[in-house]
Amino acid sequence: MIEIMTYAIIGILIVMFILLIVFCILYLKSKKKENHKSNVAKSTNAKTNKAQKNYTVESVFDFMEFDKIEDNMICTKNDTKYIMVVECQGVNYDLMSQIEKNSVEEGFIQFLNTLRHPIQIYTQTRTINLENSIQTYRNKVKEIEESLEKEKEKYEEMLSSGNYTDEELKAAFYELTKNTNLYEYGKDIIYNTEKMSLNKNVLNQKYYIVIPYYPEELGDNNFDKKEIRNLAFSELYTRAQSIIRTLSACGVNGKVLDSNGLVDLLYVAYNRDESETYGIDKAIQSGYTELYSTAPDVLDKKMKALDEKIEKEAFEMANQKVTEAKSEKEMEYQKKEESEEDLIAQLASMIIDQNKSIVGKDVAENAIQKIKDETKKRRGRPKKQALEEGGTKENEQEEQTKKRRVSKSA
């Protein structure tokens, strides 16, 4: 028994030792899988973060050199600089005399000597867009045409009435001729302008003086952004007016661009190709400044179109059926009108037959036979001949009236 117990205990210990080894192996494998999963998750997050960094979407304003246009000024990044622009009208220097050239040069030297701040001279070449001018000409010519038509009618009335003197007629004819010539001249202008607009080589140069202002010029201060912007506007406007006055000495006129002018200037600068065919005014009207546009649902639009189609076809069908019904009644009336005499004869024969006992059998049969003979005779000749033999239509109606009276009396 002791030996058996000893072997049993040894066997149990061996089995427990084997189970412990298996448990350790399984634990190590599960730990290894968990570490692998965590490493995969970390690498995936790292790749995702890397992809996000590489494909971050930035605003278009980050690529622009300014933030906004306000108070006739261009405000650059974080209000670090303010810009005002003066548009100048150029002079034709080559066609001037030597004295005029000297005067222009002296005026320009004076302009340079009076500068106390940096400026930038900017030239912009644009293709002339004559579409707005052509539309303006068309509107004017249309007004002239309407006025000309009224004057023509008035002049014709004066001629036909005969109540005006020769001097008044001459004055009216002179005004009519003058407006006619003006109308023809306006049409020629439109034709020539449209022909000129086909030439893409018609260019126009615009000259600008760019005036900057830096808030650092104020030195150490405790002003907020609104106060700094107001001070910048005052200083830039003073500089711009000073430049305009000094440029006038050399015959160059200038003006300060407003906010709309600055928008147009920047639009052409950033969109040189598109600005020739699609100006800033059309871009604003088309809603290019909006982020998105909403439209009705497609099914709603189709449903609305289908309702309109059903309503339209229903009206057409109603009109058609009413017309057909009217035509049927008219045909029935016409048919009854054509067989009026036959109906009268049939009714007369019935009346005589019903009153046979009163008028007598022989008289009734004789009367019915006469009606039949007249009917056969009438059916055997054309309607026109019957009218001619029987007289006019009024006489025929009188005869029919007499027959009715006779039948009633019978």
Image (tube, helix red, strand yellow):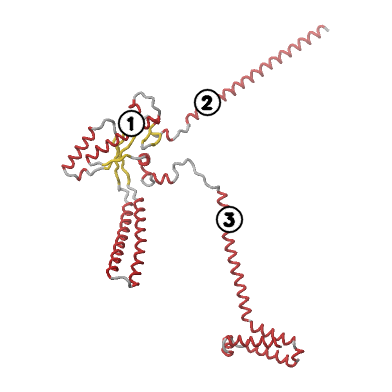
366 to the left or right of 34: right
Q: Which mark is residue 213?
A: 1
Residue that appears at 32% across and 47% down: 128
Instruction: Decide: is 384 above or below 115.
Output: below
User: Residue 269 vs residue 299: left or right?
Assistant: left
Tell me the residue at 21%/43% (across/down): 93
Residue 189, given in percent of the width and then of the height, sits at 31, 56
What kind of element bears circle 3? helix
Residue at the extreme right: 1
The residue drawn where x is 18% and y is 41% is: 101
Q: How many marks?
A: 3
Dot 2 alpha-carbon crowd within 10 angstroms: few under 14, some 14 to 19, many 20 or more: few
* Rendered image quadrant of residue 141: bottom left
- Percent from the top left, x then y, of residue 143? 36, 58
1 vs 2, front mark: 1
Crowd rating for badge 1 (residues with CA inside 10 Å; few <14, some 14–19, many 20+): many
Pointer 2 with pointer 3, Cβ within 8 A: no
Along the line of sight, the residue nearer the viewer: 143 or 212: 143
Residue 6, quarter of picture: top right
Say which quarter of the image contains residue 150: bottom left
The location of residue 14, given as percent across then percent down, is 73, 12
Q: Is residue 30 above or below residue 349?
A: above
Question: Which of the numbered marks, if any, corresponds to residue 133?
Answer: none
- What amino acid is at disc 1? Tyr
Residue under numbered circle 2: 46
Q: Position of residue 404 (x, y in %)?
A: 66, 86
Quote the CA–CA distance across marks 1 and 3.
Answer: 63 Å
Mark 2 residue type: Ala
Circle 2 SS class: helix
Q: Quadrant location of the C terminus?
A: bottom right
Residue under numbered circle 3: 307
